[in-house]
């Protein structure tokens, strides 16, 4: 499976926020822990709504959580 052109800092941000677990983040944004894991690993691109929810949890602009890499 080719890598997605979207990188993210979710794992890093979870660590900075009191070692937030994937499950805790998932519950806050309304998805499963497996979805958070897949997003972190770059195996799944979140919907725009989920991406905004993630950014809101960390109180950061979207572009500080997700970065688009031109193919």
Image: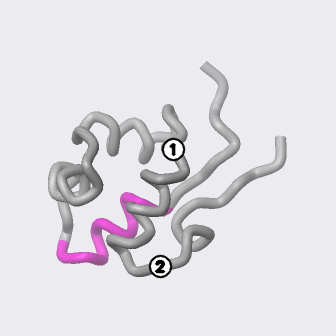
Q: Position of residue 60 (x, y in %)?
A: 47, 79
Q: Position of residue 40 (x, y in %)?
A: 42, 47
Which residue, as the protein is rendered here, is positioned at the far top? 1
**Location of residue 36 by image quarter:** top left
Which label sits on residue 13? Answer: none
Label 1 crowding class (10 Å Cα cut-off): few <14, some 14-19, many 20+? few
Residue located 30% across and 76% down the image:
16
Q: Could you say whether the residue bearing mark 1 is in a helix, strand or loop?
A: loop
The residue lying toward the viewer, choosing from 58 and 56, is 56
Where are the magenta residues, as a range? 9-18
Q: For the image shown, how many numbered marks are present on the structure? A: 2
Question: What predominant SS class does the magenta segment belong to?
Answer: helix
Q: Which residue is mark 2?
A: 60
Q: Position of residue 12 (x, y in %)?
A: 39, 66
Q: Could you say whether the residue bearing mark 2 is in a helix, strand or loop?
A: loop
| First-in-chain label (1 vs 2) | 1
- Left of 10 or right of it: where is 33? left
Q: Position of residue 42 (x, y in %)?
A: 52, 40
Q: Which residue is mark 1?
A: 47
**Location of residue 68 by image quarter:** bottom right
Residue located 50% across and 34% down the image:
44
């Amino acid at each position: 499976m080719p890598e997605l052109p979207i990188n993210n800092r979710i794992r890093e941000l979870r660590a900075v926020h009191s070692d937030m677990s994937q499950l805790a983040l998932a519950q806050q944004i309304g998805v499963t822990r497996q979805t958070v894991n897949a997003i972190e690993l770059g195996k799944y691109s979140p919907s725009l709504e989920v991406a905004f929810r993630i950014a809101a949890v960390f109180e950061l602009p979207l572009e500080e959580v997700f970065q688009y890499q031109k193919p």
